[in-house]
């Protein structure tokens, strides 16, 4: 059974382990594979973010955050980032987090969700978001320097809540 809950301070080592594994490939997130633990945890836990973890059999196996995409008059549109441990891939954790986070975004007062930078070659993420109602509303040409494929596009994806 997958439990999703607010992240706690004691979750940070597990969250760092997930982040480190996900960015190591240089194929899904803009962060350098050499980014430090301090740098990444500082980014992941900025005060404007609501942080969560997914727990499977007592182990933190995924993490995500929600925040306003823009301040002020754009703050009704949410933004988020998700990471699943490669060790837990293929178990439906990403989809469960996706649905749970949409409900949480509504609870937080967001009326829509926008992802500003989804790497086009990250087909697992793109297909997941499309399967739950997100649309590609923009393409940023050659925006991501993929570790194996060179420059690839990034998508802007959107969904009303």
Image (cartoon, rainbow, N blue to C red):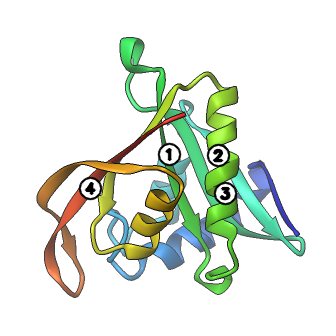
Discs 1, 4 touching: Cβ within 8 Å: no
Q: Which mark is residue 155?
A: 4
Q: Residues within 10 Å of mark 2 (few under 14, many from 20)?
A: many
Residue 45 seen anywhere in this rendered image of the structure: no
Q: Which mark is residue 80?
A: 1
Residue 49 seen anywhere in this rendered image of the structure: yes
Discs 2, 3 touching: Cβ within 8 Å: yes
Tell me how far mark 2 sits from mark 3, CA to CA: 6 Å
As helix, strand or loop, the secondary structure at mark 1 comes to: strand
**Does residue 54 sit above or below 105 in this rendering?**
below
**What residue sits right under mark 3 in the picture?**
97
Tell me how far mark 4 sits from mark 3, CA to CA: 20 Å
Which sits in the foreground, 127 or 53? 127
Give the residue displayed 63% in from the left and 82% down from the top.
90
As helix, strand or loop, the secondary structure at mark 3 comes to: helix
Tell me how far mark 2 sits from mark 1, CA to CA: 9 Å
The extreme top residue here reads 73
As helix, strand or loop, the secondary structure at mark 2 comes to: helix
What is the x, y in percent for residue 113? 47, 38
Discs 2, 1 touching: Cβ within 8 Å: yes
Q: Which mark is residue 101?
A: 2
């Amino acid at each position: 059974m997958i439990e999703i809950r607010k992240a706690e301070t004691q979750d940070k080592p597990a969250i760092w382990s997930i982040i480190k594994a996900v960015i190591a490939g240089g194929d899904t997130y803009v962060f350098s594979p050499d980014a430090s633990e301090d740098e990444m945890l500082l980014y992941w836990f900025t005060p404007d973010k609501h942080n969560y973890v997914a727990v499977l059999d007592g182990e933190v196996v995924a993490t995500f955050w929600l925040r306003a995409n823009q301040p002020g008059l754009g703050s009704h549109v949410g933004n988020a980032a998700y990471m699943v441990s490669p060790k837990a891939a293929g178990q439906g954790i990403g989809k469960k987090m996706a649905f749970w986070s949409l409900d949480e975004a509504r609870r937080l007062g967001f009326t829509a969700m926008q992802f500003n930078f989804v790497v086009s070659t990250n087909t697992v993420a793109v297909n997941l978001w499309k399967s739950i109602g997100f649309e590609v509303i923009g393409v940023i040409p050659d925006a991501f320097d993929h570790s194996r494929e060179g420059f690839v596009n990034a998508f802007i994806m959107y969904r009303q809540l």
